[in-house]
Amino acid sequence: MKIKKFLFLLVPIVAFAQESTKNNFVEPEFIKLSFLDSIKATFNDHNTSNCIDDRWLQELTNQQPFNELYNDVSTLDIDETVTFDLSTELLKKRLKKLDDKSPFNIEYNAALENVIKSFLKNRKGGFERLMAISEYYFPMFEDKLAKYNVPLEIKYLAIVESALNPKARSRVGASGLWQFMYPTGKQFNLEVTSYIDERFDPLQATEAACQYLSSLYQIFGDWSLVLASYNAGPGNVSKAIRRSGGSQNYWNIRKYLPRETANYVPAFLATFYIYEYHKEHGLKPKKAHTTYFETDTIRIKKEMTFKQIADLFDVPEDEISFLNPIYKLNIIPFDEDKPRFLRLSKDKIGVFVSNEEKVYAYIDYEKNKLEKDSSTSVASTSVEEPNSSEASPTSKPTYHKVKRGESLGLISQKYDVSVSDLKKWNNMRSNTIMYGQKLKLYGVASQKEIKNTSGQMTYVVRNGDSLYSIAKKFPGVSAEDLKKWNGISGDTIKPGMKLKTKG
């Protein structure tokens, strides 16, 4: 679809500014919108709220619990006595209750007691955080586990595996919530390419984990041995069974297993116990702000970047990355033969569905602009699309001090940048600005770049400038004016050139 068909979206909107000290209205002012802002202004049901809270997002992506649990499972000497205020007799009674209602063989063992006490003594805060994150993932886990007739208690396995970090990666390369190695992931159809790694996708990885666990149960017929096999591989468990004289009891073969696997099942059972008896031990789980079921997906029809999605739907790129960990380069590739999906909160997916044509018009516009910028020719002065800020925060910023009665819309018009860029550059979630506040701007002319020589205003050309982009910095000036005033016959300009900006 041609970009020019969407120029009707560049409608002026009226912005009212109020003089705070005089309490009177400023005359209405017409504000020219960027192509991005003009499209967003026409979105049906456009809503800039309902993003994942920053602190909650930090909890969801916190690597520390994974590092701590990984270290415990790998190095903890579970045969060393741990002192903690929990009587052995009380623990035996509680474990018996868990055994009665679980398909796992949960019998008291001194090693298991040591792991439980160690977790309660050293990881109480970590488990309180994990219990909040569990509220996000567990409903989805339980749905998949029930589908494959796998015990729901297996959900605790993901805690031992990854501490519920979807981007967790062990030192040997196991990845994702369920810590799939590359060959095992491929065996269960988890694709890995330069662009994507489906081991990091919570839904697909959980599906694959259920399939793998079901296949292991068909081999061993005991869930404790299944867990050991999930960690060490069925070959190592079969060898341990033979070395033990054929015992099918995990505790009898434990000494023949690798050290990590010898700690692995006790760590799982200890996690199970702590979740079930957290109140008795004074653990106070934090509350989840949202759950996996409060997100949704949409099939992507064109390649798009996380930045484009963030700009269109006012969602932080960190949140997009968390919800879509499958995409390694922050790009969602398009493939005719294999669907690719974007996951966002349900309200944002609703906005996408209601405005698909406009969304893809913006994607086309961005692609065309990129192709033009990457060509060897200098930008044409007969550009029909609206200009969009190409500045990068890696360049030196210009600062604007907010005056009384100014709004983001007025400031964006003054500097010919988009409102969304202003908010992004200044880490703003709303349009509220304060008198005296200093705002960062990128890609606009600073006073140092504009020189006054005997009353004649000149502009010093920078890298990336074109006649069109320079003209946009000066109201009432066109690219043709610049060419005429500076005796330029073509479109070529070079960094360092001084251009007259007045006739």
Image (cartoon, helix red, strand yellow):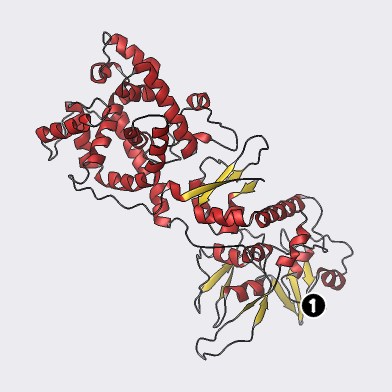
Q: Amino acid at mark 1?
A: Lys
In the image, residue 246 sits, relative to residue 21, either above or below, namely: above
Helix, strand or loop status at disc 1: loop
Q: Quadrant of residue 179?
A: top left
Residue drawn where x is 65% and y is 64% of the image: 443
Q: Note whether 180 is above or below 251 in the view shown.
A: below
Is residue 495 among what the camera can see? Answer: no
> x, y percentage for residue 425?
56, 63
Q: Is residue 256 left or right of residue 490?
A: left
Quadrant containing the C terminus in the rendered view: bottom right
How many marks overall? 1
Residue at coordinates 78% horizontally, 56% vertically from top-left?
2
Q: Quadrant of residue 493?
A: bottom right
Indicate the position of residue 26 as horizontal and vertical percent values: 60, 87
Circle 1 residue:
502
Residue 388 quadrant: bottom right
Q: Is residue 366 left or right of residue 147?
A: right
In this orientation, which residue lies closer to the viewer: 263 or 134?
134
Q: Nearer the viewer, residue 40 or 242?
A: 40
Q: What x and y, as percent, mark residue 464?
A: 72, 58
Judge left or right: residue 89 versus residue 240: left
